Amino acid sequence: MGSMNFALYPMADRYKKWKHDWEEGYLRGSDQNIFRNTFRDIETIYKRLGEGHGTKFEHECYDVGHLYNLAHILDRGLFKPPVFLQLIFGILGGIGLDMENLFFMKRTADKLFGKEYLWSVLGAGRAQMPFATQAVMMGGNVRVGLEDSLYISRGKLAKNNAEQVTKIRRIIEELGYEIASPTEAREMLGLKGADKVGF
């Protein structure tokens, strides 16, 4: 929900061997990356995909300012509540991997959006499962997958996305919560459903 530095370059020092020639240069070069998303960009995407195609958006918030940007956009009449927030922690250039930051982002979202939002959390890397677990206990939803963390536990690579989903599902159910079915999730998020898309 805004422009930001988006840097992965510190990861390059963790590796001695590379699978592909381009990997090291790509990571090291991210010290100059800017993820651009201006207010005009946001409005354009909303009009083309939201009004134009009935797309429901996931609003990725990498820092507290992104929540305020979304509140401003909603005040302008773009996007329709309830909105779906993805609170993201641990990407260099955004808010850090500190559980206090999760509480702060949630309190800020409550203040700005009241009951007019649903939310999920993404804790990058080692924070994936702890942040997901905490989010569930705070009434939120979770996101896991190899895009966010390559590991299933400390030092052990995950075999696939399904292994991470199975793990967080077990944690959620052991905490006494239920998993929404695809139909229930579409209902909660106000999605139009697979039968109403053009692909």
Image: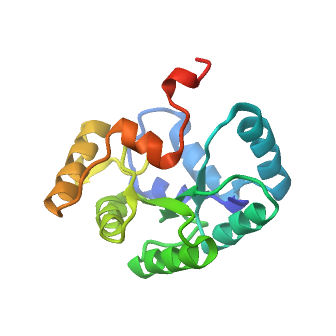
Residue 160 seen:
no
Q: Name the residue located 61 percent from the left edge and 54 percent from the top edge.
A: 59
Q: Is residue 105 above or below residue 87?
A: below
Q: Is residue 171 above or below residue 104?
A: above
Q: Name the residue located 41 percent from the left edge and 44 percent from the top edge.
A: 185
The single residue placed furthest to the top in the displayed view is: 199
Q: Position of residue 55 (x, y in %)?
A: 64, 38
* Chosen colour scheme: rainbow
Q: Which quadrant would residue 108 be assigned to in this image? A: bottom right
Task: State which quarter of the image contains the N terminus.
Answer: bottom right
Q: Is residue 160 left or right of residue 86?
A: left
Q: Is residue 50 above or below residue 91?
A: above
Residue 184 seen:
yes
* Number of numbered discs overlaid on the protein picture: 0
Q: Position of residue 164 (x, y in %)?
A: 27, 46
Q: Is residue 3 left or right of residue 9?
A: right
The single residue placed furthest to the left in the displayed view is: 174
Q: Is residue 173 left or right of residue 77?
A: left
Q: Position of residue 56 (x, y in %)?
A: 61, 43
Q: Name the residue located 50 percent from the left edge and 47 percent from the top edge.
A: 189
The single residue placed furthest to the right in the displayed view is: 40
Task: State which quarter of the image contains the C terminus.
Answer: top right
Q: Name the residue located 71 percent from the left edge and 31 percent from the top edge.
A: 53
User: Which residue is at the front of the view, 20 or 32?
Assistant: 32
Q: Which quadrant would residue 103 be assigned to in this image? A: bottom left
Q: Position of residue 79 (x, y in %)?
A: 71, 52
User: Which residue is at the front of the view, 91 or 135?
Assistant: 135
Q: Is residue 191 above or below residue 156?
A: above
